[in-house]
């Protein structure tokens, strides 16, 4: 008969817990070479030998059971609560072979809770390179525990680990340290007051700073026969406990763990010296950022052009192949246009995550965190705030959750409030299309203006986050202290498998996560743009035809036809030089006729759109966005993208497609749009204004919800929404008024 | 009513329904608030 057991994976940050979890369960949780990836517990199932089925829990990293941050408390909360349905039958403590001494502190604490524990020494493949030698059998004896030497990169040692877990009943539950040695008198009284309780568990409940076990604490405080000590006295006893533990660990490692420090430190120390240098460190980071933005613009333009053309051709094919009718129009102008507006950005999103993943995997990201700590301190943040801020380039939601690694509440709150300023991937499509429209091509020192603009927008977002943090640091009157500690992982060659997986997952979640919303909004917008209640909408064809008969085509249409004919004439002169003048004239006449028909159809479509439901809604909203340089169509796009920024481009793509029979790309359609003065609507002033609006505006309902959850109050997300929206509006307005 | 028109109405109704479910229903906005979930770890966090 099969048996179900609970297995908890616990360990210091960045020891490879999630990699072990993935190897055991066959799942594919995100892993990285910097601490703080896992901030919530994750679960999976693993089949073990002898019919044992294990429910595996991957817990956030913690340095010890004396927790200081919210993510760390997840592990302690579980280990101290025997009534929890996930309370482990066995704890698998993951350690890193290079930092074994420090990792063992947590292991001895778990052993002292009398939970059957297995020590996994991960990254064993690096032992010889780092000059490390281990006597596993002797170490097992000293620690009174079973050890599995594992390399998750090479997939070694997992079978032995499974064997050990399946055989968990044979594991020793004797403690490593006699708790009473910390303070014999104090612990004697404690044990007397609670004779049936585990002494070390009681001690942990008393000393936790984290306020997650108020009931347990109160139970101890209410007992009259035992009075607990002051906070300072308890801290002193905690220090004494740590000293006792390290004495035990040093003794255990003395004969069993040897390191040739020369082999271990040489190259890594030299690289660290350069990458974290107070001048070169920043220059290198800046150069890497430049490379990333250049790649996003230059390398991805080829696949992007292909995608754009394919979507235009597909829309054309649908119109020509399917029977004419409203459903065909919805497919071609609504659904395909909206989805095409997002899929086109897949290459750029993929490049962004390729670079971020390479930086994480190589171990460089932790150096960036360290480097940034110096910059962050004066603004009320710590280096740990950099991880959420960098994660924010993907999405603010996991980034806000990543703030749980920050011990200091004030720093954590400030980081939560400013993280949405960093440029997330949803802003990227908005920036990319606007930059392509309003920033001229050309380059300086081999870096294109467009790439530089994009980088500038990222820096503006980051700069605004820092500036807001500084202001909040002055305004918020919350007293708290915190220390900055970051793991410096070893440099390693990124695993292609991990990088490819991250790129694939992030791109997929962007396309499908945003895609569903965009598809739904595109359908609704198309419907609102294709229907109307007024006579102007229903008689649009007759009204426009009468106007054209009386006044001729609009100036825009005339210019459009003239420019097109000029280009056509030039093409005829160069490509068909042998044609007679009569043939040329005939050809031009046919072309002109065709263009006039198209222009007429376009004017009718434009008139209909203006008098459709969405046209009226847009016109009503227009006065609010007019000072920012936007017309009613952009106003609608801003409004619909309130829920999610990426909807902006999809909305414009749909609006500009309604009634359009031409096979044109989104960019061309937007470039051809004219403002009230007959100038392009998307010009430098309105383009910059829009980019700045999106750089600062909140425009993401999911982020608001997650901020509410993390701060346990609507107060902070509402402040955040109000401040960011008003600030974005004002900055966009000032930018437009100055530039126009 | 012709078939294409009918299908368009159905698709639009589904799209509106999805957006309402996604953004307007309190359940989805609050991520299904769990009983006893710990949102804050510090006693000085000001969330009490």
Image (tube, rainbow, N blue to C red):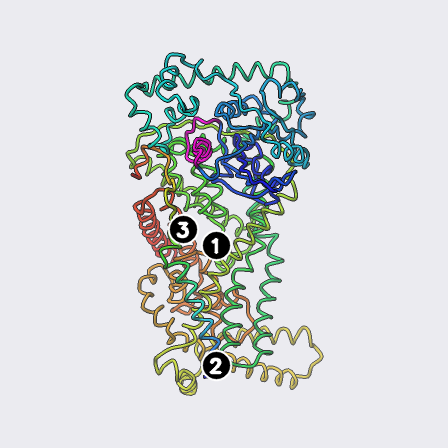
Q: Nearer the viewer, mark 2 or mark 3?
A: 3
Of A498 and A171, the residue lying toward us: A171
Q: Which label sits on residue A600?
A: 2
Q: Image check: A345 left or right of A621? A: right
> Is disc 3 in contact with disc 1, using a CB cutoff of under 8 Å?
no
List the residue tagged with mark 1. A431
As drawn, A517 above or below A148: below
* The quadrant where residue A238 appears: top left
Of A301 and A717, the residue lying toward us: A717
Chain letter for mark 3: B
Magenta stretch, residue numbers: A64-83
- Which sits earlier in the primary sequence, circle 2 or circle 1? 1
Chain letter for mark 2: A
List the residue tagged with mark 3. B31
Residue A285 percent coordinates (x, y): 54, 37
Q: Image check: A361 left or right of A738? A: right
Q: Residue at x 58, y 20 (%)?
A: A143
Chain letter for mark 1: A
Q: Residue at x 55, y 28 (%)?
A: A117
Quadrant, the C terminus of chain A: bottom left
């Amino acid at each position: 008969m099969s048996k179900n057991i609970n297995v908890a994976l616990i360990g210091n940050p960045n020891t490879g817990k999630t990699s072990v979890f993935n190897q055991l369960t066959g799942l594919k949780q995100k892993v990285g070479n910097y601490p703080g990836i896992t901030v919530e517990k994750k679960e999976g199932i693993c089949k073990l030998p002898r019919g044992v089925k294990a429910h595996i829990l991957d817990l956030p990293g913690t340095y010890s059971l004396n927790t200081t941050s919210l993510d760390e408390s997840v592990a302690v909360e579980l280990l101290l609560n025997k009534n929890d349905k996930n309370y482990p039958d066995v704890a698998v403590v993951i350690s890193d072979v290079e930092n074994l001494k420090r990792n063992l502190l947590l292991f001895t604490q778990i052993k002292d809770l009398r939970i059957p524990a297995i020590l996994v020494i991960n990254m064993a493949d690096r032992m010889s390179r780092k000059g490390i030698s281990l006597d596993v059998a002797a170490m097992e004896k000293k620690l009174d525990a079973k050890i599995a030497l594992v390399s998750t990169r090479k997939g070694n040692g997992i079978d032995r680990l499974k064997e050990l877990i399946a055989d968990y009943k044979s594991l020793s539950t004797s403690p490593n340290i006699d708790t009473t040695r910390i303070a014999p008198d104090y612990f004697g009284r404690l044990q007397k007051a609670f004779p049936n309780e585990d002494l070390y568990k009681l001690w942990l409940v008393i000393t936790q700073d984290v306020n997650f076990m108020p009931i347990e604490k109160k139970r101890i405080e209410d007992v009259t026969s035992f009075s607990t000590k002051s906070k300072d006295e308890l801290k002193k006893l905690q220090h004494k406990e740590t000293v006792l533990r390290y004495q035990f660990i040093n003794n255990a490692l003395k004969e069993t763990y040897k390191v040739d420090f020369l082999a271990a430190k040489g190259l890594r120390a030299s690289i660290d010296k350069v990458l974290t240098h107070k001048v070169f460190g920043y220059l290198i980071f800046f150069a890497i950022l430049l490379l990333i933005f250049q790649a996003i613009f230059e390398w991805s333009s080829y696949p992007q052009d292909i995608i754009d053309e394919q979507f235009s051709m597909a829309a054309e094919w649908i119109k020509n192949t399917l029977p004419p009718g409203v459903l065909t129009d919805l497919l071609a102008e609504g659904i395909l246009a909206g989805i095409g507006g997002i899929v086109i950005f897949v290459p750029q999103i993929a490049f962004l995550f390729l670079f971020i993943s390479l930086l994480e995997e190589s171990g460089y990201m932790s150096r960036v965190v360290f480097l940034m700590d110096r910059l962050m301190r004066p603004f009320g943040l710590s280096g740990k705030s950099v991880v959420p801020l960098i994660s924010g380039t993907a999405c603010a939601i996991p980034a806000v959750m990543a703030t749980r690694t920050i011990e200091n509440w004030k720093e954590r709150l400030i980081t939560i409030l400013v993280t949405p300023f960093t440029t997330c991937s949803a802003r990227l499509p908005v920036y990319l299309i606007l930059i392509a429209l309003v920033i001229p091509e050309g380059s300086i020192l081999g870096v294109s203006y467009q790439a530089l603009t994009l980088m500038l927008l990222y820096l503006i977002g980051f700069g605004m986050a820092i500036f807001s943090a500084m202001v909040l640091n002055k305004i918020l009157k919350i007293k708290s202290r915190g220390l900055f500690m970051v793991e410096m992982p070893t440099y390693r060659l990124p695993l292609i498998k991990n990088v490819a997986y991250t790129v694939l997952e992030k791109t997929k979640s962007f396309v499908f996560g945003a895609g569903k919303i965009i598809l739904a909004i595109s359908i609704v917008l198309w419907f609102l743009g294709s229907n109307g209640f007024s006579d102007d909408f229903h008689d649009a064809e007759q009204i426009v035809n009468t106007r054209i008969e009386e006044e001729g085509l609009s100036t825009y249409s005339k210019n459009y036809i003239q420019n097109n004919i000029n280009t056509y004439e030039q093409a005829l002169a160069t490509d068909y030089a042998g044609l007679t003048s009569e043939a040329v004239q005939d050809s031009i006449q046919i072309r002109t006729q065709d263009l006039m028909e198209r222009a007429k159809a376009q004017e009718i479509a434009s008139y209909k759109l203006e008098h459709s439901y969405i046209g009226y809604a847009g016109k009503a909203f227009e006065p609010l966005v007019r000072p920012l340089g936007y017309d009613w169509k952009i106003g609608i796009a801003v409004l619909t993208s309130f829920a999610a920024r990426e909807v902006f481009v999809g909305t414009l793509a749909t609006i500009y497609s309604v009634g359009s029979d031409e096979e044109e790309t989104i960019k061309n359609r937007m470039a051809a749009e004219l403002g009230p003065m007959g100038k392009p609507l998307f010009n430098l002033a309105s383009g910059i204004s829009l980019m700045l609006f999106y750089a600062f505006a909140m425009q993401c309902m999911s982020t608001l919800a997650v901020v509410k959850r993390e701060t346990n109050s609507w107060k902070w997300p509402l402040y955040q929404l109000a401040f960011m929206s008003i600030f974005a509006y004002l900055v966009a307005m000032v930018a437009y008024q100055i530039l126009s | 009513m012709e078939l294409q028109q009918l299908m368009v109405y159905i698709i639009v109704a589904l799209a509106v329904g999805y957006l309402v479910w996604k953004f307007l229903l309190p359940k989805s906005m609050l991520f299904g608030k769990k009983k006893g979930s710990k949102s804050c770890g510090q006693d000085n966090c000001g969330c009490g």
